[in-house]
């Protein structure tokens, strides 16, 4: 007997396409401070930070997978409810944890495969930036913005950090240099003390 799960709605991925569009057209430009991304960039931003992405998930692509994962993880509970078994014992918990770990492992593998296939579609400069972020610089994206530890970034600082992270050309550069010349890049002025 196939009983629908509470909170799980199958076959709705087509209904979530407008949400995807809103993410790509409105949210990502607001977060990055750049124009709406192309399809390859959208796919990059869906990857976890450890693989060079921003972890912005695409609901329509995940809906059916999440339904499958939810049904798989809760199947032992569903069976107990249908059997009118009141025991929620160690075996049920262990079964759920094992299934959850298996799904986590599957997701990790899927993300790595997506990252590998996407890597070839990116321009060379972005491939290099993604490789560097995977090995050296993605940790800051996963930190909680705790003020007490100075982990907060204001909007412009976050945009600047993403610009450095992905190797983008900086925006909002001054039109005039401090030396008075009309040049977008500042002329050397003084010596930096280390």
Image (cartoon, rainbow, N blue to C red):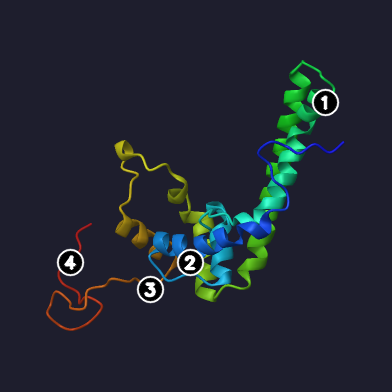
194 w.r.t. 188: above or below? above
Return the residue nearer the eye: 9 or 56: 9
User: Could you tell me which quadrant the N terminus lies in?
Assistant: top right
Residue extending furthest toward the right: 1
Give the mark toward the camera: 2 or 1: 1
Q: Name the residue under label 3.
A: 169
Residues at badges 1 and 3 in contact (C-beta under 8 Å)? no
Q: Looking at the picture, how far across and down is residue 96, in whole percent?
A: 73, 30
Which of the two labelled residues, at mark 4 and mark 1, occupies the earlier sequence position? 1
What secondary structure is marked by label 2? helix
Q: Can you tell which mark lies on residue 191?
A: 4
Which of the two labelled residues, at mark 2 and mark 1, occupies the earlier sequence position? 2
Residue at 41% over, 59% down: 31
Real-space CA distance between mark 3 and mark 2, rounded to the nearest whole angstrom: 20 Å
Which of the two labelled residues, at mark 4 and mark 3, occupies the earlier sequence position? 3
Which of the two labelled residues, at mark 1 and mark 3, occupies the earlier sequence position? 1
What secondary structure is marked by label 3? loop
Q: Looking at the picture, how far across and down is residue 15, in whole percent?
A: 64, 58
Return the residue nearer the eye: 191 or 173: 173
């Amino acid at each position: 007997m196939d009983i629908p799960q509470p909170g799980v709605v199958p076959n709705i991925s087509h209904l979530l396409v407008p949400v995807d569009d809103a993410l790509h057209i409105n949210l990502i430009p607001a977060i990055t401070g750049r124009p709406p991304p192309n399809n390859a960039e959208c796919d990059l931003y869906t990857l976890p930070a450890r693989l060079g992405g921003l972890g912005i998930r695409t609901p329509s692509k995940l809906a059916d997978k999440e339904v499958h994962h939810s049904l798989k993880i809760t199947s032992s509970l569903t069976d107990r409810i249908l059997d009118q078994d009141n025991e929620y014992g160690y075996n049920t918990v262990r079964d759920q944890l094992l299934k959850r770990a298996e799904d986590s492992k599957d997701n990790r593998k899927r993300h790595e495969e997506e990252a590998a296939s996407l890597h070839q579609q990116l321009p060379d400069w972005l491939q290099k930036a993604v490789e560097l972020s995977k090995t050296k610089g993605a940790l800051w994206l996963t930190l909680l913005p705790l003020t007490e530890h100075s982990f907060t970034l204001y909007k412009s600082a976050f945009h600047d950090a993403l610009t450095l992270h992905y190797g983008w050309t900086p925006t909002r550069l001054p039109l005039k240099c401090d030396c008075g010349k009309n040049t977008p890049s500042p002329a050397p002025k003084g010596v930096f003390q280390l």
